[in-house]
Image (cartoon, helix red, strand yellow):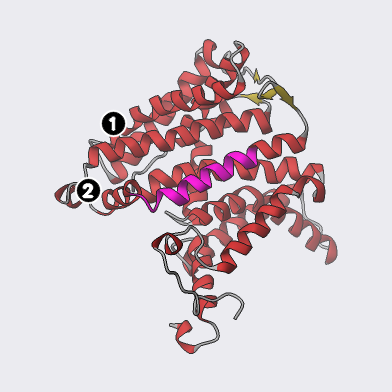
Amino acid sequence: MLYRQAGIFHTHYAEDRALFPIGFDRWAVAVLLALALTAPFTSSSLFLSSSVLPWLVWTSAALGLNLILGWAGQFHFGYAAIMGIGAYTAVHATRFGIPWEISMVLGGAMATLIGITFAFAALRVKGLYLALSTLALQFVMDWVISHVPAISGGTQATLQAPNLRLLGQSITSEAGLYYVALAWCLLVTVFMLNLRRTALGRALVAVREKDFAAAVIGVHSLYYKLLAFATSSFIGGVSGALLIFTFYRAATPEQFAVNVSIELLAMVIVGGLGSIIGSYFGAAFILLMPGQINALIGWLAALFGVRLGIEQLAHIPNAVYGAMIIIFLLVEPMGLGKMYVNVRNYLLVWPFGYARK
């Protein structure tokens, strides 16, 4: 058995509490890191800049939303607004001559400040009422961003982002921008992997399950809700800023509208609430799958000699895409991350019969 748990013994608690206690997991992570680091040399520039780079940034944002939605159990329909605040703050700070690294921190700090405003709604209402409150705040932030010229320049304006300068060095190549996005995504992933093993992570789960029961055992739900919103907002603000500097290269209000919040929610739900690897799967599915379905349907139509009109080509892929989401969630309501866990748990004890339980 190549991938197994039997026969692995630990003599120290630190070994048992390692992020990847199974040897195969460590080798798999090493291989994936090697593939990620060599991607600029093995992949085309178009694929790297149009698919892999935005996937990494959106995965970082999905991880931030998963922190508040999957772990703390707080609905958030305004995450795109948080990303927009961080993006516009970082772009303006950089245009004023502030170093790029400090601008990113300022973007995250401003997003945290606005995120705490969202958190006050969570202190008063729950469930669908909280979802409606955060959605209303999303619309408010949409209006403020698009109608205040000092922020966006106007409703139809485009705010050009300066070139990314890391440690004083201008980074304009596709490979350089990719490595910046990769570094941020890995940083957020490592943070989330360690967070779930800390007292903070366990407290957030307790608040998610029953906040009044958590209060009985000494978990201050008010404090942890504020902390969850603040941390999640910082990740979202930096991710939004990074999206502008590495991918869009310019900021417009439409990039952080309410439909973007819905797409982020779809990434988290399809990937799996509370699942770290599920955020990777969910972001890839929502972001990359529509284009692949379009290409597949076009190829099948050409193969079988079926002529499809422009309207059909526009709607059939969306119908197939929506059906795939429904099928995935019907097969496994906990998302793609849970499917991965099921396969992993099966392989841990394969080929023994009790693995099928």
Q: Quadrant of residue 74?
A: top left
In the displayed structure, 162 sits above or below 226; it is above
In the displayed structure, 275 sits above or below 353; it is above
Q: Residue pushed farthest left?
A: 216
Amino acid type at mark 1: Phe
Q: Residue pushed farthest front?
A: 11
Is residue 198 among the parts visible in the rendering?
yes
Along the polypeptide, which appears first: circle 1 or circle 2?
1
Q: Residue at x 47, y 82 (%)?
A: 355
In the displayed structure, 159 sits above or below 50; it is above
Residue 120 is tagged as: 1
The answer to whether residue 54 is left or right of residue 212 is right
Q: Which residues are magenta?
A: 181-198
Counting from the top left corner in percent of width and height, residue 247 is at 68, 33
Counting from the top left corner in percent of width and height, residue 17 is at 42, 60
Q: Residue at x 81, y 62 (%)?
A: 306
Q: Kindly report the secondary structure that dominates the magenta region of the rendered protein.
A: helix
Amino acid type at mark 2: Asp
Q: Residue at x 40, y 26 (%)?
A: 114
Mark 2 lies on residue:
211
Of the 4 image quadrants, the one containing the N terminus is bottom right
Q: Residue at x 44, y 62 (%)?
A: 334
Per the image, label 1 sits on a secondary structure element best described as: helix
Counting from the top left corner in percent of width and height, residue 279 is at 52, 51
Q: Nearer the viewer, residue 226 or 5?
A: 5
Of the 4 image quadrants, the one containing the C terminus is bottom left
User: Residue 183 in magenta?
Assistant: yes
The answer to whether residue 231 is left or right of residue 350 is left
User: Residue 328 in magenta?
Assistant: no
Q: Separation of disc 1 and disc 2 at Cα?
A: 15 Å
Per the image, label 2 sits on a secondary structure element best described as: helix
